[in-house]
Amino acid sequence: MDIQWEGLQGIQGEVVVVEDDPTLRELMVEIVQQLNAPCVAFNNADDALIHMLQPGSEFALLIADHGVPGSIQGLELSSMVRSKWPDVGIILTSGYLLEAATLPAGVAYLLKPWAIDDLVMTIARLVQPERVLRKKGG
């Protein structure tokens, strides 16, 4: 996979990925790495939250599946992150339709299965809203 986007600058801070499906988690990490961003991935929101609360942890974006194992679901994690770190971009994904009214303000929602281009454009919109992107050669 080779993702080429004009105008996308490096993301400052880690991208935290929470996805319990190992194949999809690996794909999401690969996409983020293709965007030249540091990435850390977890199969549950509990471990991701522990990581984010560590002193010195700096992250720019959370991409979380809603239905993950553990005591915290993706929607709850999104609300916690929005409360504590209001400037962090958040993408919530799910294979089930979630009501827009249940999403915290400013959280982007992608219904699975999402297209790679949709994920990349959503990442760009959240971390570099002032930039207009287009796919190279497209």
Image: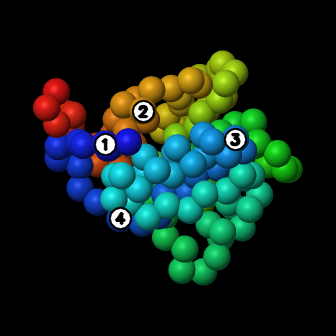
The Cα–Cα distance between marks 3 and 2, rounded to whole angstroms, is 16 Å
Residue under label 3: 21
Residue at disc 3, secondary structure? loop
Please state which amino acid type lies under the numbered disc 2. Ile
The residue mark sitting in front, 4 or 2, is 2
> In the depicted view, which residue is nearer to us: 26 or 121?
26
Residue under label 2: 116
Query: In the rendered structure, are the residues bearing label 2 and label 1 in contact, judged by CB atoms less than 8 Å apart?
Result: yes
Residue under label 4: 12
Q: Residue 3 carries which label?
A: 1
- Whichever of labels 1 and 4 marks the residue nearer the N terminus, that label is 1
Residue 113 in the image: above or below residue 105 = above
> In the depicted view, which residue is nearer to us: 34 or 10?
34
The residue mark sitting in front, 1 or 4, is 1
Please state which amino acid type lies under the numbered disc 4. Gln
Residue at disc 2, secondary structure? helix
For the C terminus, the quadrant is top left
111 left or right, relative to 20: left
The Cα–Cα distance between marks 4 and 3, rounded to whole angstroms, is 26 Å
138 left or right, relative to 115: left
Question: In percent of the image, x 31 and y 42: which residue is there?
Answer: 3
| Visible residue check, residue 25 | yes
Query: In the rendered structure, are the residues bearing label 3 and label 2 in contact, judged by CB atoms less than 8 Å apart?
Result: no
- Whichever of labels 4 and 2 marks the residue nearer the N terminus, that label is 4
- Whichever of labels 1 and 3 marks the residue nearer the N terminus, that label is 1
Question: In percent of the image, x 61 and y 57: which residue is there?
Answer: 41
